[in-house]
Image: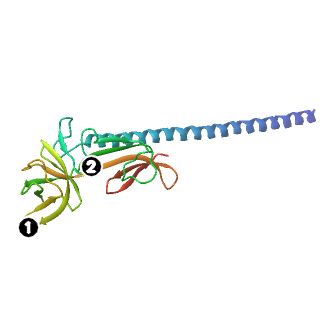
Amino acid sequence: MNDKIKAFTLVEVLVANLLAAVLLLILLEFFVFYQYVNRQINKLIDDQEKLRIKSSILYQAKLNAGYIGCRRLSNNFIVQPTGQTLITPSNIIQHFSEKRPPDFISGQPLGAIQVFRSMSAQTAEILNMPQKNELTVSYTPRFKVGNLLIVSDCQHAELVEVSHVSQSMKNKQQYLMFSQKLKSNYMQGKVGQLTVKAFYEMKNTRGKVGFYEDVLGGRREELFEEG
């Protein structure tokens, strides 16, 4: 009788251990599944946040596109070109495939490239126009030879390239000479640098895809890593 009781108790122990092992395995699988689901949820939240930031950046760039100091370009606004650089309603916002990137983008972008053109938010006030290829403007922001500037008086706008700069701290003025004559008379208005920004995706040095901002004649910055 005692042997039967002992044998029955041993079976119970074995069954209990087996059940405990199965339960532990189920809990372990549940934990692994929970970790996987949690990672996927966090990744989804992170991806949505990056998409929100990306959309916000592109939306703001689109709002600023075509800004010429006092208004934005409309279809009937007259903008005079200089050289090969144009700023018109039709090209203030441009989309390129990776097969035809803008000249100032190096590397191998992935997918579409979005380019936005406008006048810099930092502008100088027009004080005088001594000659058709000259302007006297306020002292800041300070310009230099080679700058591409937008000259605007809310009725016309022109692109000009600076060929000579003379700055007077005493009079708080800058004297600008351009490589070509202005087509309109500007006795008031604003002068600011042409800003060209491009946004695109490209693989970074870590082999992951990053979202980049490139500025013509300036910096390249990885805004965030997409994955």
Total numbered circles = 2
Residue appearing at x 13%, y 65% in the figure: 167
Residue 163 percent location from the top left of the image: 19, 61
Residue 57 percent location from the top left of the image: 34, 43
Tag 2 secondary structure: loop
Quarter where residue 78 is shown? top left
Image height of 103 relative to 51, above or below: below
Image-based side of 160 in relation to 127, left or right = right
Image height of 40 relative to 136, above or below: above
Image-based side of 86 in relation to 9, left or right = left
192 and 170: which is toward the camera: 192
Residue 224 percent location from the top left of the image: 42, 49
Q: Considering only order in the chain, which callout, 1 or 2, is on the residue closer to the N terminus?
A: 2
Image height of 143 relative to 89, above or below: below
Quarter where residue 66 is shown? top left
Estimate how packed mark 2 is, as few (under 14), some (14 to 19) or many (20 or more) residues with alpha carbons within 10 Å.
Answer: few
Q: Which mark is residue 17?
A: none
Give the residue number, with chain letter if any, for mark 1. Answer: 170
Image-based side of 14 in relation to 34, left or right = right
Q: Amino acid at mark 2?
A: Thr
Visible residue check, residue 219 = yes
Residue appearing at x 14%, y 60% in the figure: 176
Mark 2 and mark 1: Cα distance apart in space: 35 Å
Residue 124 percent location from the top left of the image: 15, 54
Give the residue number, with chain letter if any, for mark 2. Answer: 85
Q: Amino acid at mark 1?
A: Lys
Please report contact status of discs 2 and 1: CB closer than 8 Å, yes or no. no
147 and 71: which is toward the camera: 147
Tag 1 secondary structure: loop
Estimate how packed mark 1 is, as few (under 14), some (14 to 19) or many (20 or more) residues with alpha carbons within 10 Å.
Answer: few
